[in-house]
Image (cartoon, rainbow, N blue to C red):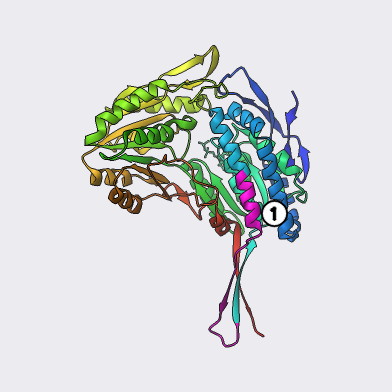
Amino acid sequence: MNIKANYIAGEWVGGKSSAENVNPSDTRDVIGLYARADAAQAADAIAAAQAAQPKWAAFTLQQRADALDRVGSEIAARQAELADLLAREEGKALPDAAGEVQRAAQIFKFFAGEALRVPGELLASTRPGMSVEITREPIGVVSVITPWNFPIAIPAWKIAPALAYGNAVVFKPAELVPGSAWALTEILSRAGLPAGTFNLVMGRGRDVGEAMLGDARVAGVTFTGSEGTGRRVAQACVTRRGPMARFQLEMGGKNPLVVLDDADLEVAVNCAINGAYFSTGQRCTASSRLIVTEGIHDRFVEAMVAKLKTLAVGDARRAGTVIGPVVDAAQLQQDLDYIDIGRTEGATLAIGGEALPEVDGQPGFYLRPALFTGATNAMRICREEIFGPVAAVIRAADADEALALANDTDYGLSAGVCTTSLKWAAHFKRHLQAGMVMVNAPTAGVDPHVPFGGRKASSFGPREQGRHAAEFYTTVKTAYVSP
Ligand code: ADP
């Protein structure tokens, strides 16, 4: 089997070792062998990026826009093939994977447009006869470090703005999903960027990733992953020798979905099922706390259990599958451990929670989606991110208590409320402490042209996506000219 290589300084470069990319829907299926870089190769990529960045920044805005647009067009044209690869390596159901690939294409196209709209300001000065110009310039070399749960969309929403504003990129995808990253790199390799503008180094966080933080030639680090790693990223960016790196961190969530007495039951159940279980619950925006007021509680639980019985668990690429497998054995074990913790803490497992060693004769990391009832907000299953198809129902006396419970968390990424009352919709929209609020809609996902990000322990630094992305990927210059 040939080994898919890293991409450094415009060349395909073998790694120091390699690793198998295994299909979680059928562990007998090895998708391919992918190179693993080491710290020295990460340094080579950083050097190449540093050398290329001024050349890329000197391209006209139109050339930069055209290059990104071509990438978006090719991703869109190859949607079916890329979605198949994504579902095969990550395990989300094919329709979700297709949506993610389409999103990646849209993001490249959106930032192709943004490349033409680099914002600036011209202000009058307090100094007589002078004006002040505020412009934005690229920051330089950006390290992009991504998780496994969105193998193409998260890389796209970091790489596209980095390039749009004239930066060079060193990209390290998560170890579990090198396939989508490699495919995206192959597309970028033909987009007409100067060699070294975009580099792919696949490998482990503790060697390749760390080398992308501590190098003083890296101006910024954009990271999505766990909270623990996020803190390490921040520390490395601040304590390294030479200038500090700016950093942008997207980390965990423990997102509440509040269901009020006056909610439309069908809307509420659809929001909860989609929010908690789609993409196998492996989303930082997953609604893992379902906070339900007294008057609708029993009907909601009954309807959830009935609906969960109908969700087909199986091979991500099989027609009809709604819930694909968990991504790997370690994540499955973490999910099962939390299910045990929930039981021990005194919550009731209303349905699901069993690992299925095989579905349709295929060995994989399958888990029946689990719903706890009788949970309290103090339980670990309601405080810690599980990152699997596991949700807990918390009973609330009324809307005020529901709001207080929703906000009683260390996290603040997204939050939702289901209600038919204009008054309560406005109240929750105003008072939910989260970066993204959804009324009668699932907690997951926002459009590519609006900001994505959270509060509290969920995020650090400027928002991602939309024109807000310029805050991270550019540096501001204030210039005076005396006539
Ligand atoms: P997850 O639990 O979702 O795998 P991680 O935070 O472990 O989240 O991983 C997110 C990304 O961060 C991955 O690409 C991983 O390789 C990388 N990573 C892990 N440890 C480090 C580290 N010490 N320095 C830099 N990157 C790291």
The image shows residue 342, relative to residue 10, as above or below, that is above
Judged from this view, the residue extending furthest toward the top is 361
Judged from this view, the residue extending furthest toward the bottom is 128
Does the magenta run of residues contain 125? yes
- Percent of width and height locating residue 70: 71, 46
Residue at image point 55% right, 46% down? 223
* Mark 1, other Cα within 10 Å: few <14 / some 14–19 / many ≥20: many
In the image: residue 200, left or right of residue 293: right
Q: Which residues are magenta?
A: 106-130
Does the magenta run of residues contain 454? no
Identify the image quadrant of residue 304: top left
- Percent of width and height locating residue 421: 29, 46
The image shows residue 11, relative to residue 305, as above or below, that is below
Residue at image point 40% right, 31% down? 273
The reply to whether residue 143 is visible in this rendering is no
Quadrant of picture, ligand 1? top right
Considering the image in quadrants, where does the N terminus appear? Answer: top right
- Percent of width and height locating residue 432: 34, 49
Residue at image point 29% right, 48% down? 424
Task: Name the foreground residue: 148 vs 470.
Answer: 470
Task: Name the foreground residue: 430 vs 483.
Answer: 430
Task: Residue type at mark 1: give it.
Answer: Ala
The residue at which mark 1 appears reads as 65
Identify the image quadrant of residue 13: top right
Regarding mark 1 in the picture, which secondary structure is present there?
helix
The image shows residue 156, relative to residue 135, as above or below, that is above
